[in-house]
Image (cartoon, grey):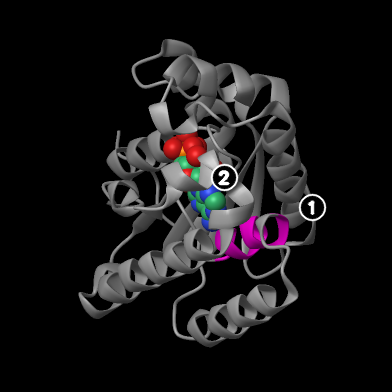
């Protein structure tokens, strides 16, 4: 079973994937963010750097998922904090040159066929204001140039994507209601009330006591 979290920037995907892995004694598959060499440049000049950023993201994500597949990671219960399709969603927004869009699509479609699709997608929805607050609070240097308008556009893309998504089972959750914060008692009770009852029947296993 392969479960993946998705949601806009700052929704809490990584924290949720990590905690669900612990709860279900599964294996976390977390995005190797430290290996995104272009993201800082992207935020400084999105128009100029979008193509190299998106190509870089699909190659990194592809290799991480392929490596996991070859290492037999998907033979276990896996909780990932990203899916390959997220880069299609970002590229739809960031790539404006038709030649670059075409080359991205050719590469994306070629790679997409070679990687596994999750059995269940956990969709974390959130109002943009909530995400903006979280991103300001976590204060990652490279995200400092991000504008509210950009975040709002990414968030709208995610909402459209969640609506249309039909590749597997999906569970739609409201991220602010969960208050995804490690060690928070309200998050623990939201996990028990809202996430685990929806997820366990799909996974076919109960969480650890
Ligand atoms: N394909 C992409 N194109 C442009 N930027 C991207 C892309 N994928 C991720 N990013 C950027 O990389 C950074 C990390 O984003 P991502 O949503 O993957 O993780 P996150 O915000 O740390 O997740 P969470 O807080 O939900 O655990 C963000 O600044 C995001 O805008």
Is 56 displayed left or right of 136 in the figure? left
Task: In the displayed orientation, state which residue is furthest to the left.
Answer: 71
Which residue position is annotated with label 2?
A: 45
The residue tagged with tag 1: helix, strand or loop? helix
In the image, residue 200 sits, relative to residue 148, either above or below, namely below
The picture places residue 7, in percent across and down from the top left corner, at 59, 43
| Quarter of the figure with residue 2 | bottom left
The picture places residue 128, in percent across and down from the top left corner, at 71, 27
In this view of the protein, can residue 192 be seen by the observer?
yes
Is 1 displayed left or right of 92 in the figure? left
Quarter occupied by the C terminus: top left
The picture places residue 105, in percent across and down from the top left corner, at 64, 79
Towards the viewer: 68 or 99: 99
Which residue position is annotated with label 1?
A: 160
CA neighbours of label 2 inside 10 A, class few (<14), some (14 to 19), many (20+): few
In the image, residue 145 sits, relative to residue 80, either above or below, namely above
Magenta stretch holds residue 188: no
The residue tagged with tag 2: helix, strand or loop? loop
Magenta stretch holds residue 92: yes
The picture places residue 79, in percent across and down from the top left corner, at 38, 52
| Quarter of the figure with residue 87 | bottom right
Question: Which residue lies at the image location 61% right of the left edge and 41% below the top edge?
Answer: 8
Question: Which residue lies at the image location 45% right of the left edge and 76% below the top edge?
Answer: 116
Residues shaded magenta: 85-93
In the image, residue 68 sits, relative to residue 153, either above or below, namely below
Towards the viewer: 91 or 133: 91
CA neighbours of label 1 inside 10 A, class few (<14), some (14 to 19), many (20+): few
In this view of the protein, can residue 201 be seen by the observer?
no
């Amino acid at each position: 079973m392969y479960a993946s979290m998705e949601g806009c920037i700052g929704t809490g995907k990584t924290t949720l994937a990590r905690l669900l892995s612990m709860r279900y004694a599964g294996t976390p598959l977390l995005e190797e963010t430290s290996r995104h060499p272009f993201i800082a440049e992207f935020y400084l000049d999105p128009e100029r750097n979008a193509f190299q950023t998106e190509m870089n993201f699909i190659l990194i994500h592809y290799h991480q998922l392929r490596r996991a597949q070859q290492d037999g990671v998907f033979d276990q219960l896996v909780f990932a904090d990203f899916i390959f399709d997220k880069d299609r969603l970002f590229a739809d927004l960031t790539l404006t040159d038709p030649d670059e869009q075409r080359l991205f699509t050719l590469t994306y479609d070629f790679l997409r066929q070679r990687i596994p699709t999750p059995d269940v997608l956990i969709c974390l929805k959130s109002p943009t204001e909530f995400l903006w607050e979280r991103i300001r609070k976590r204060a990652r240097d490279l995200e400092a140039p991000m504008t509210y308008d950009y975040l709002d556009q990414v968030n709208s893309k995610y909402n459209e994507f969640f609506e249309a998504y039909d590749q597997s089972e999906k569970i739609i959750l409201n991220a602010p209601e969960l208050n995804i914060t490690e060690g928070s008692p309200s998050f623990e009770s939201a996990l028990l009330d809202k996430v685990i009852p929806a997820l366990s029947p799909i996974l076919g296993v109960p969480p650890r006591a």
